[in-house]
Amino acid sequence: MSRINRLFISRWGPVLTGIAIGILAPLLVYWGNPGNMGVCVACFTRDMAGALGLHRAAAVQYMRPEIIGFVFGALGASLAYKEFRPRSGSAPLLRFFLGMFSIIGALVFLGCPWRAYLRLAGGDWSAIAGLLGLVVGVVIGVVFLRRGYSLGRTHPAPQAVGWIMPALMGLLLFFLLAAPQLGRDANGDPTGPIFFSTAGPGALAAPIAIALGVGLLIGFLAQRSRFCTVGAIRDVILMRDSHLLNGVVALVVAAALTNLVLGQFRSGFTDQPVAHGNALWNAAGMALSGLAFTLAGGCPGRQVFMSGEGDADAGMFVIGMLVGAGLSHNLNLASSPAGPTPYGPIAVGIGLAFCVIIGLTMREQVTA
Amino acid sequence: MSDAYTVDASGLSCPQPVLLTRQALRDRARDTIAVLVDTATSRDNVRRLAEREGCQVDVEERPEGGYRLVLRR
């Protein structure tokens, strides 16, 4: 094993990855991404759902290169270090719905855990409620884990199964670059098949090559170091192991410092970019997300990275997120800077009930 | 290793391999425990736990894929 690789496998791995993300994410904002949204797996999946026309919220339609880069970066790392292993079979349909509910919760808060930490590092204190909710969700997930919750074993699968997600990302990259906008509506605006916001957060984006490059780098580093923003909380609660949490702390510190240097740090609870101050639903949305991520074995970033390693069950989770993001906007579940919608909280309630049922009933007898 | 208690954690999601290993280390009076995992991530996580619990860890690659960690107190 090369010295650099040994470093990433060591206890410094998550820290170095966190530092890299903490510097690069605010830079992506500086280069054009929306405020405090240098990297957000939930928001970006939602933007990609919009690009594909799975929802028609005009302000959030863009095929985010970062996510594509994440998958390819993780793919590259796993191939280079012989960790690419096509596998499937661990309750894929349940993972699809966990992915769906996880993003419904995240879009009520307006961010995934990555963005919660980045909002914090940008001075957006409304993220604190979200992070508290995230911890609550993870704690509930840990209770289920301790009681023997399991989605069952995954099994080795044929190569094609492992390459589907990278191939899909290749197709999405093609759509981003070719930008087919062939239809016109009555106003003369493009109606797809691939959508690009002309206003709103979907219109705010760093240049494609930079966003893709950053995604590739983060995907590579995160695959090597097993970076996971939910495992960070889970392992401290479960085992008093701060290996992953160190990475998250490094991320927040590095991002805060980078934001300060770039003049992007703005302290306050209100009027923050792409955020609302409804503490209850910030917390509840993230609680649903945190529980769903814990039940699925990792944060949304980790699910994306694992889908690049050949894990088709993680791939199902990511597809569930994509569909959930489309539904979130079509069914008016997603919040706006004005706050939650009337229906988002109902969906959070349904999602929590689903996760609790899964947590209580999925106790496949796993005898050692 | 005929008398090693074996924990079969292959194919299980994070954090189960570590949870099962920790349970085995606490429940068993045995000095030697073998843990089967299928990914490098699980291998590294179990190894880290075992070393923290004061075990000596030997890792071997399994011919059918995956790894077998032998934990000795």
Image (cartoon, coloured by chain):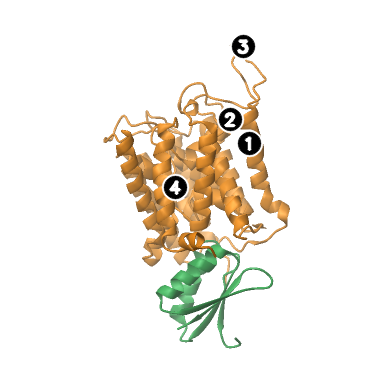
Chain colours: A orange, B green
On what subunit does the disc labeled 2 rest? A
Marks 3 and 1: in contact by CB < 8 Å?
no
Tag 3's secondary structure?
Answer: loop
Could you give the CA–CA distance between mark 1 and mark 4, rounded to whole angstroms? 28 Å
Residue A179 coordinates in the image, percent (x, y): 63, 26
Q: Are marks 1 and 4 on the same chain?
A: yes
Residue B37 coordinates in the image, percent (x, y): 58, 69
Residue A275 to residue A136: above or below: above
Residue B40 to residue A261: above or below: below
First-in-chain label (4 vs 2) = 2
Residue under label 4: A288
Q: Which corner quadrant of the image does residue A10 belong to? A: bottom left
Could you give the CA–CA distance between mark 3 and mark 4, rounded to whole angstroms? 40 Å
Camera-side residue: A289 or A310?
Answer: A310
Q: Which quarter of the rendering shows the N terminus of chain A?
A: bottom right
On what subunit does the disc labeled 3 rest? A
Q: Nearer the viewer, mark 3 or mark 4?
A: 3
Q: What amino acid is found at the position of numbered circle 3 in the picture? A: Ala
Q: Which mark is residue A186?
A: 3
Q: What amino acid is found at the position of numbered circle 4 in the picture? A: Leu
